[in-house]
Amino acid sequence: MTVLGISLAYFLAAAQIGLLVGWVHTNSAIINHAGVDVWVMSKGTRTLDYGTAIPRHRIQQTLSVPGVKWAEGMLVGWVNWQHPAGKRITVEVIGLDSGNAGGPWQMSKGDISAVHLPETVIVDELSRQALGITEIGQETEMEGRRVIIGGFSQGVRTFTAAPFVFTSIENALDYVPYYRDDEISFVLVKCNNAAAAKSVRDRVDREINDVEVLTTEEFAERSVKYWMLETGVGITVIITASLGLLVGVVIMSQTLFSITQDHIGNYATLLALGFHQKTLRRIILMQSLILGGLGIIIGSILFLFACQATALSPIPLETTPLVSAGLVVFSLLCCIAGSWFSIRAVFKLDPVSVFH
């Protein structure tokens, strides 16, 4: 039962941290999957979702900068989607250039090239029910104009309540009313040498006025900080994850402390028989590490199953090697802390009292 309790406690902590990691990956997924090294945007842009208009000729200006292999535009806008049931839903339109940089990285049905057909869009499998879409070729309306479903992406989640709708820049300009034909939201830049992304960023920043230039890593980090630290949703996720981690490690420590308390008479007997305190410390510490280690292994297996079960859900549980290693080390330290309090309780006993 002790190992089971530790396993469940570790799983609780891992699940809450996994939820936080999943959210972080979600709100920067398109940025990180775009396959580019540098982003050019309007000054002060906080995140991909709130890109504002810049002239489309920024693409040609960027292409003239040494070190740039290719550059493409992207248009991001918010419009109304007409659900077949009659209600209107706010969606986030992503307009793609000819190379589809920033588009879906995995398709479940159809081909990404469909976005370049007139009035054609791609939506994600996770959004089909919300948008009332059942099949490729289905027609509906967006901003009062006809749209045709050209395919379904897989795993493109949204951190906001608005589903992503992918199409071409040309199509997007027909649906997003506040963009002119010569405007886009971002220029996506691929460098000749990815390792030189910061150098290219600096050159683009010097040669093009009235824009902000960030590497992919910088833009992803800015987006994560915005959603996680400057919005109520992100702060709530952080608080929930922190409380889950705290509760999990407290349960683990308390479980190990309790098992020592249950056998405190036996330890006192060993002291009365002349066992050295160092020996008992090693016994209790080793017991805590073994039980804690087994619990962590079982809890990790449960967490991996949970990750697989939520892989296609709107809120996935995810982790990274660094996060997993940190959680294991932190949990083992909590096990050691629990054993330390147990040792103190044992050594406070009068060994002679066990014979009374």
Image: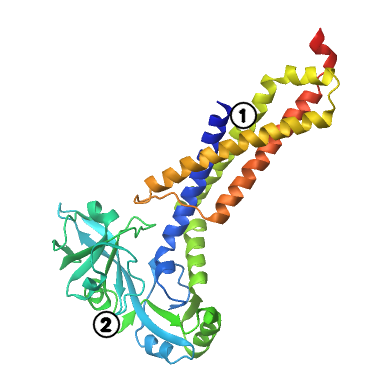
For image coordinates 66% across by 39% down, the residue present is 334
Say which quadrant the N terminus sits in: top right
- Picture coordinates of residue 270 (x, y %)? 79, 20
Residue 165 visible somewhere in the drawing: yes
Q: Is residue 220 left or right of residue 132?
A: right
Label 1 is placed on what type of residue? Thr
Q: Secondary structure at mark 1?
A: helix
- Please give the residue where the numbered disc 1 appears in the rendered image: 255
Residue 234 visible somewhere in the drawing: no
- Picture coordinates of residue 99 (x, y %)? 32, 78
Mark 1 or mark 2, which is nearer the start of the sequence? 2
Say which quadrant the C terminus sits in: top right
On screen, residue 287 above or below 152: above
Within 10 Å of disc 2 (Cα), the crowding (few <14, some 14-19, many 20+) is few
* Residue found farthest to the top: 356
Give how far apart the Cα atoms at labels 2 and 1 are.
65 Å
For image coordinates 46% across by 52% down, the residue present is 318
The answer to which of 199 and 296 lies nearer the viewer is 296
Label 2 is placed on what type of residue? Asp
- Picture coordinates of residue 66 (x, y %)? 49, 91
On screen, residue 219 above or below 240: below
Q: Is residue 23 left or right of residue 279?
A: left
Q: Secondary structure at mark 2?
A: loop
The answer to which of 28 and 262 lies nearer the viewer is 262
- Picture coordinates of residue 187 (x, y %)? 40, 80
Q: Is residue 144 left or right of residue 301?
A: left
For image coordinates 50% across by 79% down, the residue present is 194
- Please give the residue where the numbered disc 2 appears in the rendered image: 181
